[in-house]
């Protein structure tokens, strides 16, 4: 069996890791293509190293540009390597521009498309990722649903491909790393972790200003706020002339560092899909700066709260979250840590 796996961002590298390892252990010929979508390719390489994955076989060298130009370049530059390798499957993880470009290229070339993390739905048409994943799902031959809710979404939409509930490969990675690093939840912290990168939060002056003001208020309450800042977020904040002097900013951190920071935090404020899940698994309360989430499982029991518009009452909401005790619980919403094993078995059966 020959497989081409297309990635372009750090989260895609992370969620692909257990599947790559499982494919290689089953003597599958795996061809990894990195589009270069991410701002800093060297930073992405450090994630390959941390995940113990070989460097990509091909880097398309796609640079930052408008969304349309970047998508067009991804589709165009994928044609030659996909034709040359002629894989049995083209696998795309997630919902990025790279995933959409790979899905469209594979479809035009008549190659079988496999979508990891299929069926996630926020039902927010303003999010690029929501449109991406819906198109990818409708183009896929095989769809791997990470949760029962995702599986139900796909069945309800009557997608044309074959749908399988496998569990989430990100949960596979999470269990592996927390065990190796002996990461356990701390309940004695006054740390608050914040990450923001979505366009509707960082490219809107009023919104990003309110977010920074809210974070400053949280800091004044005696909390230590840490902000690993995405390069594009940093650029936008600088463009708007906003100050981060009262917030402890850091460069983007490795996956293992992020898990440690998250486990030692009393609260996560984010607009990231992946971090919502990791906070849920670590039992860290989460405030999501969006009006909806594709991971509805995390909203149960109030562990994740949606905060779309920041108002005078937002700080009160956060105070309540910080003061509330969150009892430790086990969940199998995202599988049992064997998603990659199930995926490889399905791929062999459907050759």
Image: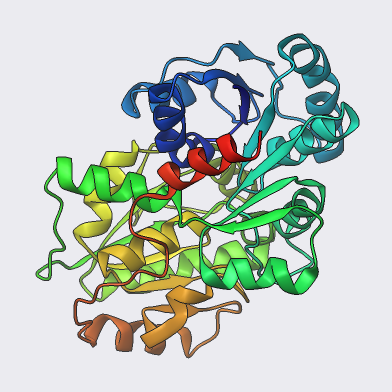
Q: Looking at this view, is 128 or 342 the one in front? A: 342
Which residue is found at the position 41% from the left and 70% from the top? 333
Is 253 situated left or right of 232 in this image? left
Which residue is found at the position 67% from the left and 41% from the top? 114
Q: Is residue 314 above or below residue 126?
A: below
Q: Looking at this view, is 313 or 95 the one in front? A: 95
User: Residue 213's spot in the image, x, y percent?
Assistant: 47, 69
User: Residue 112's spot in the image, x, y percent?
Assistant: 75, 34
> Which quadrant would residue 96 be assigned to in this image?
top right
Q: Quadrant of the N terminus?
A: top right
Which residue is found at the position 78% from the left and 20% from the top? 78
Q: Quadrant of the C terminus?
A: top right
Residue located farthest toward the front when viewing the structure as drawn: 349
- Can residue 220 be seen? yes
- Can residue 272 be seen? no
Which residue is found at the position 65% from the left and 62% from the top? 119
């Amino acid at each position: 069996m020959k497989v081409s796996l297309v990635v372009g961002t750090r989260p895609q590298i992370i969620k692909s890791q257990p599947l790559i390892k499982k494919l290689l252990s089953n003597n599958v010929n795996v061809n990894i293509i990195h589009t270069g979508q991410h701002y800093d390719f060297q930073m992405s390489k450090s994630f390959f190293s941390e995940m113990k994955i070989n460097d990509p076989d091909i880097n398309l060298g796609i640079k930052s540009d408008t969304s349309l130009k970047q998508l067009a370049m991804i589709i165009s530059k994928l044609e030659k390597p996909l034709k040359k390798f002629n894989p049995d499957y083209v696998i795309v993880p997630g919902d990025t521009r790279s995933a959409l470009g790979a899905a469209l290229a594979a479809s035009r070339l008549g190659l079988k498309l496999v979508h990891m993390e299929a069926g996630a739905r926020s039902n927010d048409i303003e999010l690029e990722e929501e449109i991406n994943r819906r198109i990818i799902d409708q183009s896929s031959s095989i769809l791997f649903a990470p949760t029962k809710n995702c599986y139900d979404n796909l069945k309800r939409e009557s997608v044309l491909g074959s749908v399988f509930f496998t569990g989430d490969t990100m949960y596979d990675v999470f269990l592996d790393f927390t065990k190796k690093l002996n990461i356990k939840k701390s309940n004695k912290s006054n740390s608050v972790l914040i990450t923001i990168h979505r366009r509707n939060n960082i490219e809107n002056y009023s919104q990003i200003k309110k977010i920074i003001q809210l974070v400053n208020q949280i800091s004044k309450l005696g909390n230590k706020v840490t902000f690993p800042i995405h390069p594009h977020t940093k650029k936008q904040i600088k463009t708007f002339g906003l100050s981060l002097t009262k917030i402890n900013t850091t460069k983007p951190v490795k996956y293992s560092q992020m898990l440690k920071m998250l486990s030692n935090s009393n609260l996560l404020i984010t607009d990231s899909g992946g971090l919502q899940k990791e906070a849920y698994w670590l039992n860290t309360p989460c405030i999501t700066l969006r009006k909806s989430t594709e991971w509805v499982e995390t909203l149960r029991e109030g562990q994740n709260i949606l905060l779309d518009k920041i108002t005078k009452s937002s700080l009160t909401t956060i105070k309540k979250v910080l003061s509330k005790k969150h009892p430790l619980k086990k969940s199998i919403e995202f599988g049992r840590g064997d998603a990659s094993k199930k995926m490889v078995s399905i791929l062999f059966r459907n050759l």
